[in-house]
Amino acid sequence: MTAPTNSTLRLDALFNMLGVLITFIVVLLAQINPPTDPQIKPAGNLVASAAWPSGSIDVDLWLGAPGDEGVGFSRKSGKVWSLLRDDLGTANDATSLNYETAFTRGLPDGEYAVNVRCFGCAGFVPVPVDVEVRLATGALVWRGIVALVADKQERTAVRWMMRDGAVVLGSKNFVFKDVRGV
């Protein structure tokens, strides 16, 4: 029996390292789990959005939830609602689209309100604001157009009661509710 040569030892070490690398790759591939549901889930349990005509019009979405202070441009997150972005019209914006969206984390029982306020609308009134409120399941809570006819005007688009994660039948109304707490 002859002693192995240097080239045989190098070749043997190379094949051993290749075997270890292949083992790592097989183990890593076994750990990859493809997503079972390719659909994107909404960020929260309830989503409210407001959209208005393009231009330098600044409309603010204000939201109220049970046991929480109002959420809007000056207080973007509360216990329940979170405002994703304060749209200022054309300022700091790469598109001509004007809209704001907010979502909830959970759905505590009680009264909810969605207001729109014409923060910077001088010279553009009346401003039609398309408001939509949906549950994460896709069920429509309310959709409609709210007309803001004066600068600094605030109107309640809709208010309603939630119980056990569902809208209480007959609870929707449009009576103004101050959610900003001013």
Image (spheres, rainbow, N blue to C red):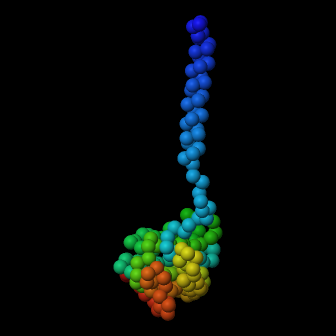
Q: Nearer the viewer, residue 23 or 139?
A: 23
All told, the count of numbered labels is 0
- 32 shown above or below 142: above
Q: Is residue 34 left or right of residue 167?
A: right
Which residue appears farthest toward the left when viewing the image?
Answer: 67
Q: Nearer the viewer, residue 7 or 139?
A: 7
Q: Who is closer to the viewer here, 110 or 91? A: 110
Residue at 57% in and 32% down: 21
Residue 71, by quadrant, is bottom left
Where 81 sits versus 15, above or below? below
In the rendering, at what x and y percent does residue 121 appear?
A: 55, 79
Residue 22 position by quadrant: top right
Give how far across and how far down residue 70 sits, in percent.
Answer: 41, 77
- State the image coordinates of residue 110 (x, y, percent, origin top left): 40, 84
Q: Residue at x 47, y 91 (%)?
A: 171
Q: Is residue 28 left or right of 78 when viewed as pictured?
A: right
When the figure is inspected, residue 111 is found, relative to residue 84, above or below; the finding is below
Q: In which quadrant of the rendered image does the C terminus lie?
A: bottom left
Q: What is the x, y in percent for residue 41?
A: 56, 67
Task: List the single residue furthest toward the top.
Answer: 2
Q: Residue at x 40, y 78 (%)?
A: 108
Q: Image quadrant for the N terminus?
A: top right
In terms of depth relative to the viewer, which is nearer, 128 or 67? 67
Q: Quadrant of residue 5?
A: top right
- Residue at 59%, 22% (x, y): give it: 14
